Amino acid sequence: MTMSSSADTVADHIDALRARIDEALPALVADREPAVLYDPVQYVLEGGGKRIRPIVLLLVAETYGTAPATTLPAALAAEVFHNFTLVHDDIMDEADERRGRPTVHKRWDVNTAILAGDIMMGLSYELLGEVEADGLYDVYHPMVEQLCAGQALDASFEDEDDVSVEAYLEMIDGKTAALLSAAFELGATIGGAPPSDREHVRTAGMLVGRAFQIQDDLLDLTADGDDWGKAVGGDLVVGKKTYLTLRALERAEGAEYDWFARLADGGLPPEDVSEARDRMARLGIFDEARDVVQRYSDEARTHLAVLPDGEAAGALHWLIDEMEARSH
């Protein structure tokens, strides 16, 4: 098999898993009543997405010989939970759009969005309970607490002038990486992996989560606007603290520091985004961020070496490569 055909085969396998997830998600609530509660939930579950978390969960379990049909409810649980967090995040951020569509609280109202998120969280637990494997809730419950703590830290950063990069990494370990890490570990748990493997896989998920978020921060300033699907530099405009802005503040001195310090005063005007990008490039922030994404991804691959060899493990490594190289 050639390199190209092998990559095509892996991509086809992942696309098939994604299609299976996309088909199953809206069907979860298709016949549930009352419509005033479940129509918004179905709207969210039909909204698309990369489906990284459920695909990772399915692939890890598959490396240990557990078929996707057995693991699917847990994979759906992870994706439903992820989408629940997005619904509530959008309320907290007062966001008008998600994936090119009105957010739930804009299409309906805030109360409806809160309830839709609540029922989605409950649905995720219902789905996880459909999988016959010990120890799943021992992974799930701590993830929920860690993710909520990360979200709380993220919200608190808005009112803090002095946030360190270390504090930012602690925040994304909760808000972004906790669910990814749990998806990796749930797959290993369902697959019957030994405890030592589960520890390595859990750590790999945390590292992938860090890489994923820092890549997101990077793309907010460097992505092609058409592919990115939103205004480039949006994080700067709203004054959001990211890996890039915090490193810029750590590196900048004198007048350069004063220029970036304006971010803490509500963000930059859109017309200053281009200059901010140029200043960050001169400080080496983009190169450093790319290096950090690669380092975390490489460390994750090292931990994933414990996985049994096979097509599923190859697909998982390919997926991490794609996440590291993504441009939107």
Image: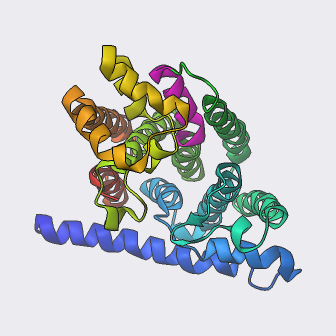
Residue name at image x 81 percent, y 63 percent: 119
Please provide percent x and percent y for residue 211: 39, 40
Instruction: Report if residue 51 lies within the magenta region.
Output: no
In this orientation, which residue lies closer to the viewer: 45 or 61? 45
Can residue 242 be seen here? The reply is: yes
Can residue 253 be seen here? The reply is: no
Q: Which residues are magenta?
A: 164-177
Image quarter where the C terminus lies is bottom left
In this orientation, which residue lies closer to the viewer: 259 or 225? 259
**How many labels sit on residues?**
0
In this orientation, which residue lies closer to the viewer: 96 or 262? 262
Residue extending farthest to the top is 254
Instruction: Report if residue 173 lies within the magenta region.
Output: yes
Q: Is residue 310 above or below residue 203?
A: below
Q: Is residue 28 above or below residue 292?
A: below
Residue extending farthest to the left is 2
Choose top left, top right, bottom left or bottom right for residue 296: top left
Q: Is residue 169 left or right of residue 126?
A: left
Q: Is residue 130 left or right of residue 324?
A: right
